[in-house]
């Protein structure tokens, strides 16, 4: 794992409360720890209850002393929703990678008619000021294919691993996912992780 000046990989994860952002960060951290790497996890701000903006950080490597990711230093930005991804695009480094779920979840203000949701082109144009490495896909659709919309976060987990930024084995990831949920949810979550992993690998 390398960056320009340290042996650290910085990952920012953003979404809406209820999408499983916090669970994703926890399982990713467990996977990394299982492989013997130092990791720091933090929730920068936001409210975990349903509908609130949530941002988590995961820093991996010997030089990761704390959870804070400075603007322009994230190697990977993982967005569960387009506008939420755009909201944190300032965190990604120039030429960094963005994984974005394209499925729109309108904020309350938009649903009530008090704000306008930007167009897809506006969102991508704004992101391209920071990076053109954007892997956009309908993660909710993949979660449905896996068997449950609640496995959305595991689709995103698989996509993170599929980028190759974190040197962990696929078997290790699957083992951690199996241990993280009750047995009856194992097939769905493992399947969702595999779908996300395969998608990201295809975009490398």
Image: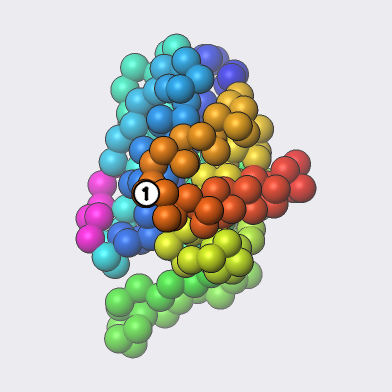
Over which residues does the magenta segment extend?
Answer: 44-49
In the image, residue 2 above or below residue 126: above
**Residue 38 versus residue 44: which sits nearer the camera?**
38
**Residue 48: within the magenta?**
yes
> Mark 1 falls on what kind of element?
loop
Q: Determine if residue 39 is in view.
A: yes
**Residue 191: within the magenta?**
no
Q: Which quadrant: the C terminus?
A: top right
Q: What residue would you read off at disc 1? A: 182
* Rendering coords of residue 136 (x, y %): 64, 58
Q: Which quadrant: the N terminus?
A: top right
In the image, residue 141 above or below residue 185: below
In this view, which residue lies farthest toward the top? 62
In the image, residue 132 above or below residue 50: above
Residue at 32% from the left image edge and 53% from the top image edge:
54
In the image, residue 183 above or below residue 19: above
């Amino acid at each position: 794992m390398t960056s320009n000046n340290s042996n650290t990989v910085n990952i920012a994860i953003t979404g809406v409360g209820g999408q499983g952002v916090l669970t994703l960060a926890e399982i990713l951290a467990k996977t990394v720890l299982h492989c013997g790497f130092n990791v720091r996890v933090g929730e920068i701000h936001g409210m975990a209850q349903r509908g609130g903006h949530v941002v988590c950080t995961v820093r991996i490597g010997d030089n990761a002393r704390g959870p804070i990711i400075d603007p322009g230093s994230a190697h990977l930005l993982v967005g569960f929703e387009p506008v939420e991804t755009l909201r944190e695009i300032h965190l990604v480094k120039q030429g960094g990678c963005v994984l974005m779920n394209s499925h729109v979840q309108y904020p309350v203000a938009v649903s009530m008619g008090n704000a306008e949701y930007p167009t897809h082109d506006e969102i991508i144009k704004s992101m391209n000021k920071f990076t053109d490495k954007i892997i956009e896909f309908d993660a909710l659709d993949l979660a449905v294919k896996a068997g449950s919309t609640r496995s959305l976060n595991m689709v995103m987990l698989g996509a993170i691993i599929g980028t190759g930024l974190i040197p962990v084995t696929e078997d290790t990831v699957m083992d951690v996912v199996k241990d993280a949920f009750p047995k009856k949810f194992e097939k769905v979550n493992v399947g969702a992780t595999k779908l996300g992993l395969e998608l990201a690998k295809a975009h490398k």
